Image (cartoon, rainbow, N blue to C red):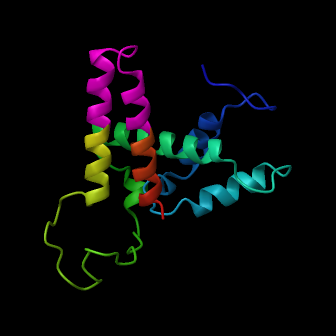
Amino acid sequence: MAKANGDGQTISGYFRKVFQENPKLLHGRSNQELLQRWLKDHPGEKEVPQKVRANLSNIKSVLRKEARRKGGRPKAAAAAPQPPAPRAGQPAPGQAATNTGAPPPLEQLEEQIDECLSLAKSLGRERLSHVISMLRHARNLVVWEQGR
């Protein structure tokens, strides 16, 4: 069961509300805007705790997975997309991508880790609790890397 902070709201509840207010943040690559908003909304904090960062990664992954099940991004998020900066192994702006229509490699990795996580849970949460924990950690790292 998730614990609520001093104002009665969980960390994931806070981020769900933020993503509901501004869906484009869910599909953005950077988490910086989200972390700055969290700091602004929590004036007693000097820096974002690791627990909040991990929770952000988890909830972002869960909401992205739910969006994939529902048939993709909301229409509002598709308006005026910002081109991401090229990364190693990706074509520069103006160059043709090799796999048009396919999700980016890190998103594919996130989806596959989610599938492994679901399978591990179905095989037995108690018996595979350590594996489930490691898969969650791996998924969090991939989501975090997508947000860089």
Find the magenta span and give its range: 114-136
Looking at the image, which is closer to me, 13 or 143? 143
**Rendered location of residue 117, percent (x, y):** 32, 31
Whether residue 126 is in magenta: the answer is yes
Q: Is residue 71 above or below residue 119?
A: below
Q: Is residue 136 above or below residue 18?
A: above
**Rendered location of residue 47, percent (x, y):** 75, 56
Residue 85 as seen in the image, left or right of residue 68: right
Whether residue 82 is in magenta: the answer is no
Which residue appears at 49% of the width and 40% of the height? 58
**Rendered location of residue 76, percent (x, y):** 43, 56
Badge count: 0
Q: Is residue 56 above or below residue 119?
A: below
Q: Is residue 59 above or below residue 84?
A: above
Looking at the image, which is closer to me, 39 or 24? 39
Residue 71 visible in rendering: no
In the picture, residue 97 is in which quadrant? bottom left
Residue 108 visible in rendering: yes
Q: In the displayed image of the protein, which residue is found farthest to the bottom?
A: 94
| Quadrant of the drawing holding the N terminus | top right
Residue 19 as seen in the image, left or right of residue 78: right
**Rendered location of residue 16, percent (x, y):** 56, 39
Q: Could you tell me what secondary structure mostly forms the magenta stretch?
A: helix
Which residue appears at 13% of the width and 72% of the height? 98
Q: In the displayed image of the protein, which residue is found farthest to the right?
A: 44
In the picture, residue 75 is in which quadrant? bottom left
Which residue appears at 38% of the width and 75% of the height? 83
Residue 34 as seen in the image, left or right of residue 138: right
